[in-house]
Amino acid sequence: MSQLNIQTITSVGIDIGTTTTQLVISRLTIENTASGTSVPRMEITAKEVIHRSKIYFTPLLDHELINSVAVANIVKTEYDAASLTPNDIDTGAVIITGETAKKDNAKSILEALAGLAGDFVVATAGANLESIYAGKGSGAAAFSSTRHQVIVNIDVGGGTSNFAVFHEGKAVDTACLNVGGHLIEFEPRSDKITYISKPAQKILTACGLTLSVNDHASMTQLRLITKTMAECVLELLNQNRLTPITQELLMTQSIRSPFSFHKVMISGGVADYVYTEIEPLSVEEVTCFGDLGPLLGWELGKKVVASGYSLEKPTETVRATVIGTGTQSVNLSGSTIHVSEQTLPLRNVIVLAPFATSENIPYQNISLPIIKAVQSLQEDGTNPYIALSIKGPQTMAFADIQALARGILEGMRDYLEEDKPLILILEDDCGKVLGQSIEALALGPIEVICIDQVVVDECDYIDIGKPLMGGRVVPVIMKTLVFNR
Amino acid sequence: MTAEGNGQLETLIIQSVLEELSKNGLFDSKNKQQVVNSAVQVINSAASVPITPLIPEDEETVTLPTDEIMVDNPFNLEAIRAMKKTTPARIGIGRAGARQKTVSWLRFLADHAVAKDAVFVDVSEDFLKRMNLVAVTSAAQDKEQFLTNPELGRRLSEEGVRIIKEKCSKNPQVQICVVDGLSSSAIEANIPDLLPALIQGLNSIGLKIGTPVFIKHGRVWVQDQVAKLVDAEVVISLIGERPGLGTAESLSAYMIYRPNENTVEADRTVISNIHKGGIPPAEAGAHLVDVLEQILKVKVSGVKLNQK
Amino acid sequence: MILKAKVYNNVFAFKNLKEVLAKANEEKSGDVLVGIAAKSASERVAAKLVLSNLTLEDIYNNPVIPYEEDEVTRVIYDDLNLRIFQEIKGWTVGALREYILGHKATGGDLHHLSRGLTSEMIAAVAKLMSSMDLVYAAKKMRYQAHCNTTIGVPGTLAFRNQPNHPTDSIEGMISSLKEGLSYGSGDAVIGINPVEDNVDTVSRLLETTKNFMVKWDIPTQNCVLAHVTTQMKALEKGAPVDLVFQSIAGTQKANEAFGISADLIKEAFELVQKKGTATGPNLMYFETGQGSEVSLDAHYGVDMMTLESRTYGFGRRYYPFMINNVSGFIGPETIYSGQEVIRADLEDLFMGKLHGLPMGIAPCYTNHMKADQNEQELSTLLCAMAGSNYFMGVAGGDDVMLSYQDTSFHDDASTREILGLRPLPEFEKWLEKMGIMEDGHLSERAGDPSIFDK
């Protein structure tokens, strides 16, 4: 029997943000942690960052366009520095964050990079996912589980502030606000404004300031701007009614945490100025990197503490998101699954959840909701790979598994006629028996990918990698994450 | 009251609950009608399934509360909640003086009672009939003999030998034995889901399966005798594990390729912890198919199999 | 040597000392299984009668397993103080019983005497004792030992915090550890039975417990109860080991089945002296149990109780910090009922103490025995009265890794309260500092594992 008990994989994380672009390479150790007489249980047991890139300014052609060639060069340079080639990379993710994600060409650049950066590096985006990666990279997630206290991580970057509330290691809520240190740009170490972004314009208006490019800003004006920004952040944190400016800057839903909290951690580029003792006193000190970052950090730190929160130090500041992306984007399936190996990897699979809850599986008529769900997806003309996600199932009795298998085969009949593999993602540990049952009940040969112990939601996009650990598990990478409320 | 007659009332209840939830922002009212419909459907379909109640419905029943945190005024409730998730141990159970609280004490007693019953009560005749198993006994005549004299459980009674010779097909690739071992409850709880999954999987890869037998008062080694009697290539025993207070329903699978006089314990491949809280029985059945297929392919089991 | 006795109208004759020793036992299933138990109540009394008249010299001259054949016999005989033995060799077993029970004999006297007794003599005298005899005699004897702290201090009762976890989860182990500490359990040792007997797991558990002890400044010792060779490898690699553990038995054959010998234990003891983290001088922890030789088919037709006594004779060579039985864990083929467990626990405690050992007891039972919690608690109280140095501490009494029941954290705290016993002195100070205990009883906030989560 293939008793592969330990394997390491190399994972890359690339974060292209409003201000900076970074890359980390990590080594993930996957181990069979079950005892000799148990069914194997594969887990990621160690995550070690083996290479941290320099922090580059994100190469832009203008304020709207990323210079994809330059980004690719950064990646190549850093691979060289780490003595690795794209072939050495097993998995990973590129995440486009902050302001950059909004820009028109982000998507195509992501795809270009995915090809460059190894065989199974996926492009991800989305404010929710970014917030979670940042909080995992900053140490907030670990803090919540080891200290058993709810904590909010705010990753304040150049363009956005990403909030994630963690409870016992899990993100329970996220939000994203268009507030960051780089929304207004200056000539470094001077008071001369060189760029004002659209959200910054809104903030200026809200402060009653009329500043434009080439104007000279005073320290008083800078304080007013950064105080306003910090107040927007606090409004979200306090879960109060939002002022009009905060509402305008809010890019997602506001925070509605199911748990109360009083611990706050701040990561991202401005975080170093949150935890410093030295207040920036002059315009030159503020604009030393050509933006407002230092002063925003300072104001934010003061406001958070003044509002009664207790501020915890992150383990990573500016690299939080990229480390989270590199080390946290891979999930492993359960260890008894049913896969047709030659079918994998599969990219850009959309998740459909035909049954709302595990109690909702209508055993008398399983196929109908499946047919409806598939049809509704196909109405928009696209024809993607579909993964059926099944919560539970509540019962894992053999008879119910058989019924489920029959219903799925019937419900997916049309889809299967297109010669696509049947992809099933279950929450509970019954992937192998369901896969086996489907194969036994199918009239002809059928390619089945039936994996379990993975939680995905309707409309998530996922990639499923080639099996690891002698075929026992597959890596699953989330590319977007929809937060259900 | 019929399920239909009750339907309206249920719709009302569900609607009002959802309204409350959406007031608090916990529910998106757009999907309300859909959710109400499906909830009512669930309730009705549950009502239409005939369930034999263990006790008449109109009698009130005392039950053990679910496992909860019973520490008075804990310093950090979240921490205890998280701790309880990390271990099945009985923690966060509080105290009355230095003694256990009533509920945790009674739960302990209940768990011990269930564990004892798993050991000391036999697998029911009815169950054996339902599972269509050929039933034999070991040389142990009763539970006490079985427990205090392990040797007796390792071989079949004379009648058992006769029955197996008479009723079981010969030369199978896989011979399945269901053995009560130290937990009859493990057999009754797991076999109905494990056995069909195992048989389905073995059939689908075209293996010849022998006649499944049940051995009362049996231990692991009895499988060697059965394998020899029917001349099986590989024999698998599904046997009840010694119950703990956590579960009395844990089952193990012991597999061995052509056991003989020189067989040692290390020649057996073991998969343990099969129960609904461990590896679920149906899934275990599917997994065991892979293991048996491997054993037949390389023609060894146990430690040697892992080395292949 | 007279091997024949008459009980009223029946005369019983025995072949040899081994048979007398076996038949003088209270009934236990393991002796029945091996076929050496008394066939009737009268035969049992006859054997006791014969035994009471044998001299210590008779027993000395008839080791149950010959010196040449068995390492355990050699350890027992080689370590005997012959001068003391010469003084008492003419005593009958019956006289020895009365000497031990007599008001004149102090704990110190018995300690002195113990150096001149072989394990078979100790087993023999225990066979003439009732339950209360055993408690009464055991209570006189109290032995201290020192690792990082001192165990066996008069007026104290210590506990091994046993935070086992079914998959060796570090987090899960810590959860149970915190629960136990919050009840005042853990002054004897923080001792974990690992599922996986490998260096990585063992080292990980050792490091975690050590770090926890350092972080919270807990005056105790740590131990992971893997095979001795695994712990030695962990020690070599630098793992923080206070106590080295091993299961031991009363015959060479059984010890071989455990994968140990006298030389190996000596080597382990020397290694932990050199590379361990504790002060010492007592650095070993042993577990024993009536019936292990029977389940390993290594009993030579000797009864379980005598073999258990020989186990203590083997163990005392290494000056352990802790040694306790787990007689109730071995299984129904050796000990079947609650009554048998209680008797075995009392015998073991007495026999261990008469070997001069700092004995603890694990009054425990499994679910395939005819035993229950009431009997387990009776045994705990009796052993506490008899002056056991320590017991185990298991969350809710349910060991979720070994699947058996042992003394709970609650039982630990209750036993202290009932008998007015205190934790080991340094540990009690720590409990007071943590607000877990005040004036010798649990404080309001005791029993809350989250006090460690600030």
Image: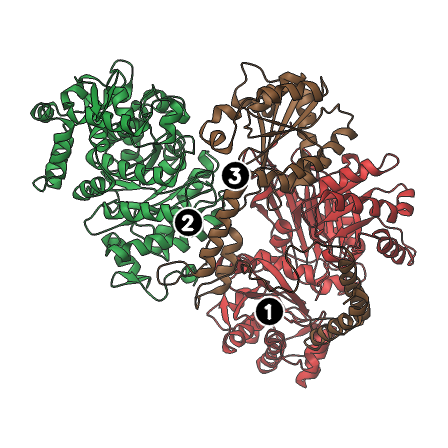
Chain colours: A red, B brown, C green
Rendering coords of residue A318 (x, y %): 58, 59
Q: Nearer the viewer, mark 2 or mark 1?
A: 2
Q: Nearer the viewer, mark 3 or mark 2?
A: 3
Left or right, C250 with respect to A89, comes to left
Left or right, C401 with respect to C347, comes to right
Measured Cα–Cα span from mark 2 to mark 1: 57 Å
Residue named by callout 1 = A293
Q: Quadrant of residue A381?
A: bottom right
Q: Quadrant of residue A255?
A: bottom right
Q: Amino acid at mark 1?
A: Gly
Would you call the spot at circle 3 few (<14 residues within 10 Å), some (14-19), or many (20 or more)?
Answer: many
Rendering coords of residue A251 (x, y %): 72, 70
Residue named by callout 3 = B119
Q: How many marks?
A: 3
Left or right, C410 with respect to C24, comes to right
Residue named by callout 2 = C397
Q: Amino acid at mark 3?
A: Val
- Local SS, label 1: helix
Measured Cα–Cα span from mark 3 to mark 1: 69 Å
Q: Report whether mark 3 lies on the same chain as mark 2.
A: no
Q: Nearer the viewer, residue B32 or A120?
A: B32
Image quadrant holding the N terminus of chain C, namely top left
On screen, residue A325 above or below C114: below
Image quadrant holding the C terminus of chain C, namely bottom left
Q: Nearer the viewer, residue A292 or A39?
A: A39
On screen, residue C172 above or below A469: below
Which chain is indicated by disc 2? C
For image coordinates 35% across by 67% down, the residue present is C444
Q: Nearer the viewer, residue A38 or C146?
A: A38
- Local SS, label 2: helix
